[in-house]
Amino acid sequence: MKSKKSLYIVPVASTEFTQEAFLDCSGIRPTIRYSYQDEHGEVHSGIAFSAVSAIRCRSEACCSVWHIEDTYDALVEVEQSSWEEEVRRDVPDQLQIGWKARHFMIYLDSAGCFEFLAEAWEVLPEQSRQSE
């Protein structure tokens, strides 16, 4: 049975983001980026993923309760993931040596559900921009 292990909760509710969260694949690490206001101005941050094997995204309208439950504003690891098993079956045996992909998932308001098969993740340092 699939279970979800909580790893990280975003610092503010995604309903308070100043712009909708989005997936940025322009660099070497796919990153979910978001912005919000604090007492000093706008803050930019995100969650970056390393050694990514696969990515899935569902718009808010296409998410089931399973995609939202336990993942709303929270990064989780899906344990015993059927998606990870499906992708692994498609990878040639010689490329599976050292396979360390884990299934990460997060739901953010208005943006939907993001899923990654990746080896690791990290929260980006917050970058503040002073309000004028």
Image (cartoon, rainbow, N blue to C red):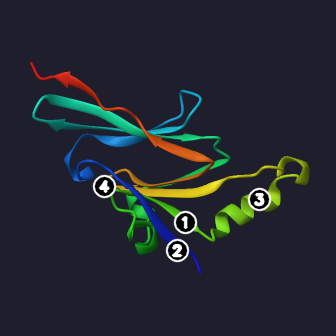
- Inspect the image, locate mark 2, and give the three-letter code of the amino acid beneath it: Ser
Residue 37 percent across, percent down from the top left? 17, 36
The circle on residue 3 is 2
Query: Closer to the N terminus: mark 4 or mark 1?
Result: 1
Locate the C terminus by quadrant: top left
Please, is residue 69 above or below residue 16 in the view? below
User: Disc 4 marks which residue?
Assistant: 109
Q: Around disc 4, counting alpha carbons within 10 Å, would you say few (fewer than 14), some (14 to 19), or many (20 or more)? A: some
Q: Around disc 1, counting alpha carbons within 10 Å, would you say few (fewer than 14), some (14 to 19), or many (20 or more)? A: many
Disc 4/disc 1 C-alpha distance (Å): 20 Å
State which mark lies toward you, 4 or 2: 2
State which mark lies toward you, 4 or 3: 3
Q: Quadrant of residue 73?
A: bottom left
The circle on residue 88 is 3
Q: Which residue is at a point 10% across and 34% down the rendered structure image?
A: 39
Check if mark 4's residue and mark 3's residue have beta carbons within 8 Å: no
* Front in this rendered view, residue 62 or 85: 85
Disc 4/disc 2 C-alpha distance (Å): 22 Å
Check if mark 2's residue and mark 1's residue have beta carbons within 8 Å: yes
Check if mark 4's residue and mark 1's residue have beta carbons within 8 Å: no
Disc 2/disc 1 C-alpha distance (Å): 6 Å
Check if mark 2's residue and mark 3's residue have beta carbons within 8 Å: no
Q: Quadrant of residue 7?
A: bottom left
User: Disc 1 marks which residue?
Assistant: 78
Could you say whether the residue bearing mark 4 is in a helix, strand or loop?
A: loop
Q: Around disc 2, counting alpha carbons within 10 Å, would you say few (fewer than 14), some (14 to 19), or many (20 or more)? A: few
Please, is residue 110 above or below residue 131 in the view? below
- Inspect the image, locate mark 4, and give the three-letter code of the amino acid beneath it: Asp
Disc 3/disc 1 C-alpha distance (Å): 15 Å
Q: Which residue is at a point 40% across and 74% down the rendered structure image?
A: 65
52 relative to 4 in the view: left or right: right
